Image: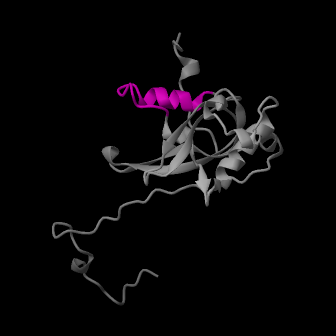
Amino acid sequence: MIPLNGYDEVSAGYPPAGGYICKIQAARLSNFQDGTKCLEVELDIDEGEFAGYFRRETNTFNKNRPDGGWTSNGRIRLPLQENGKIHWKLKRFLVSVKASNDNFVIEPDKGFDERILAGKICGGVIGLKEKVNEKRNNAVFTNAYISYAIPVGDVASGDFKIPEKKLAETKISTPTKDTPASSNIPFDPDDVPF
């Protein structure tokens, strides 16, 4: 008999690129690296085979870092303003949440408390990106990440565009003087391989 302890907590891989029903775990004001204010939203897949994927990923990454926070793959960051008005990316996100939740109301004249987003649902478009792990002989692996939010109805209808896979930049090694150079191999012009 093979023990299957923790079967439901262990991932069998990453979710394929596509649209998923997601639940907002938390939302807070933050800053981009350049100091510009943004809304940081933590999302997780809420339905289907990959439900809870980003929570499991967060728990795995934070085993040795208790203050590590939510995985960046399950987080989107939205700029707040552009030219003195709400940024179009933030508005598109709020429209997606509003379309996905009957009890969600936006009153532009009163401002908005980002904390009320927690527990709301929306669609999430997941893309794939490669990363090079230098600690493991530069092995390339693939991660799923939330690219952007859409209304839940668009997930069901397939009305979204999956981003192209982000490929890892691989390092090209150059020969050193300890590496045999191809110029040391004798060349016979009558023995062409084609």
Q: Residue sitting at 25 percent across and 78 percent down?
A: 185
Residue situated in front as seen by the camera: 107 or 130: 107
Q: Residue furthest bottom?
A: 189
Question: Horizontal placement of 173 versus 66: left or right?
Answer: left
Residue 43 sits in which quadrant?
top right
Q: Looking at the image, is 192 positioned above or below residue 149?
A: below
Q: Residue sitting at 64 percent across and 28 percent down?
A: 118
Q: Residue furthest front?
A: 109
Residue 172 sits in which quadrant?
bottom left
In the rendering, at what x and y percent does residue 120 appear? 70, 30
Q: Residue furthest top?
A: 1
Q: From where the camera sits, is residue 35 visible?
A: yes
Residue situated in front as seen by the camera: 120 or 103: 103
Question: Horizontal placement of 137 versus 164: left or right?
Answer: left
Q: Residue sitting at 45 percent across and 31 percent down?
A: 69
- The residue stretch that appears in magenta: 52-70
In the rendering, at what x and y percent does residue 51 appear? 65, 28
Question: Horizontal placement of 134 versus 186: left or right?
Answer: right
Q: Looking at the image, is 38 positioned above or below residue 10?
A: below
Tell me, yes or no, whether the highlighted magenta stretch contains residue 62.
Answer: yes
Q: From where the camera sits, is residue 50 visible?
A: no
In the rendering, at what x and y percent does residue 129 appear? 53, 50
Q: Residue sitting at 55 percent across and 21 percent down?
A: 9
